[in-house]
Image (spheres, rainbow, N blue to C red):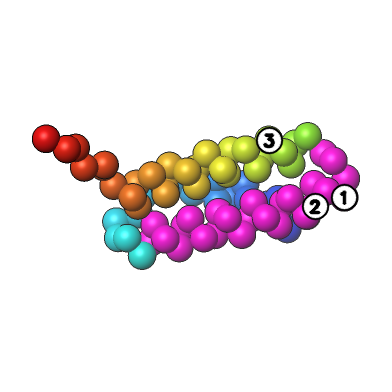
Amino acid sequence: MKIIEKALEFETRKMRFPTTSDRIMAAREAKDLILSLNEVYKQNKDNNIMDIMKRLTAIKQRIERRLKGKPLTSS
């Protein structure tokens, strides 16, 4: 299962993205991994795959939150 190995490697990679383009690429890679894992999960319903997808989703959400920046406050 190369997809699972890739997902675990992405998960353990350092999450330092100095530029916006790095963040965008990481978010896209996480999304691709999640969708690929979902296809595998549909076939064999392994709970370990679901756990990996949940962790990757959390990482992706953190990256996207950082991309959006802080919300502006109205005064």
Residue 4's x, y, as percent?
71, 50
Depth check: 5 or 71 in front? 71
Let me know if residue 45 is in the magenta part.
yes
Decide if residue 66 is on the left or right side of residue 37. Answer: left
In the picture of the structure, the residue carrying the numbered disc 1 is 43
Q: Which mark is residue 40?
A: 2
- Is 68 positioned to the left or the right of 60 in the image? left
Q: Residues in magenta?
A: 22-46
Under mark 3, the amino acid is Asp
Q: Main secondary structure of the magenta part?
A: helix
| Disc with the residue nearer the chain's start (3 vs 2) | 2
Q: Relative to 72, does residue 1 appear above or below in the rendering? A: below
Apparent side of residue 28 relative to residue 16 in the rendered image (left or right): right
Q: Secondary structure at mark 2?
A: helix
Residue shown at 50%/47% (left/top)?
A: 60
| Residue at figure coordinates x 78%, y 54% from the top left | 39
Residue at the extreme left of the image, as rendered: 75
Task: Work out how far the residue at label 1 is from the one at label 3, CA to CA, in angstroms.
Answer: 16 Å
Of labels 1 and 3, earlier in sequence is 1
State which quarter of the image contains the N terminus. bottom right
Quick check: can you spot residue 15?
no
Question: Marks 1 and 2: in contact by CB < 8 Å?
Answer: yes
What is the three-letter code of the residue carrying label 2? Val
Callout 1: SS: helix
Whether 3 is among the magenta residues is no
Rounded to the nearest whole Å, what is the CA distance between mark 3 and mark 2? 13 Å
Q: Is residue 20 visible?
A: yes
Q: Which residue is under mark 3? A: 51
The reply to whether the C-beta atoms of the residues labelled 3 and 2 are less than 8 Å apart is: no
